[in-house]
Image: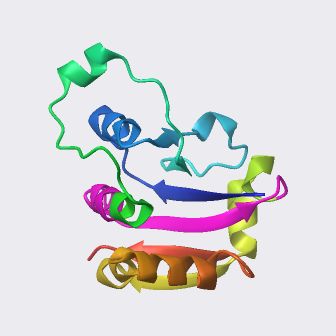
Amino acid sequence: MSLFYHIVTKGKLPERTLLHSRMMHFLLKENANYIYDAKPGYNYYDLTPGVIPSISQSEIDNEVLPLREYFREHEYFIWLIKEFKKLGDFRFIALWEDNSKCATGYYERFFKTCEKKYVTFDEFYTFFESRKAFDEFLDTYSDSRDVLFIVSVK
């Protein structure tokens, strides 16, 4: 089993954000083509941490992005959720995938079975403020139960 993150939003991330993610060695991709019960007007993103996708030199040269060589996962999420905040409210879930949940392609059906936790963006942000907070977040919300965070940016 592997840990995956899924984010659903009405807004669409710009290509620059997806490239920036790749340059930080995190594979962030829109995957609506593989979701059988996608809600119209929503964008579904999968995030696989620690993947190092190939990036061409021309892609790097065409973008001026402030990057360090190595980002810790919680630091990456601090940047990423701010990018999603620009798009408005979003849903977030971290889960251990064993090919019986989101991998089936029925995201919305699976989300209906999850515990829902309504939080403000500021509350959600605290889960990523430090490595310790991030580890506690994962221990609490991704191991024994599936919790879908519904994040309000207002």
Range of the magenta residues?
78-100
Is 66 positioned to the left or the right of 59 in the image? left
Does the magenta-highlighted stretch encompass residue 82? yes
How many marks can you see?
0
Q: Is residue 46 above or below residue 23?
A: below
Image coords of residue 122 (percent x, y): 29, 81
Q: Residue furthest front?
A: 69
Q: Nearer the viewer, residue 91 or 81?
A: 81
Q: Is residue 93 above or below residue 125?
A: above
Residue at horizontal 82%, vertical 52%? Answer: 99
Q: Is residue 63 above or below residue 133?
A: above
Does the magenta-highlighted stretch encompass residue 94? yes
Quarter residue 145 falls in: bottom right
Residue at horizontal 40%, vertical 66%? Answer: 74
Image coords of residue 102 (percent x, y): 73, 55
Is 52 positioned to the left or the right of 77 in the image? right
Q: Is residue 151 above or below residue 77?
A: below
Residue at horizontal 27%, vertical 14%? Answer: 58
Q: Nearer the viewer, residue 25 or 147?
A: 25
Q: Nearer the viewer, residue 109 or 59?
A: 59
Image coords of residue 144 (percent x, y): 75, 82
Look at the image and tell me in which quarter the N terminus lies.
bottom right
Q: Residue furthest top?
A: 58
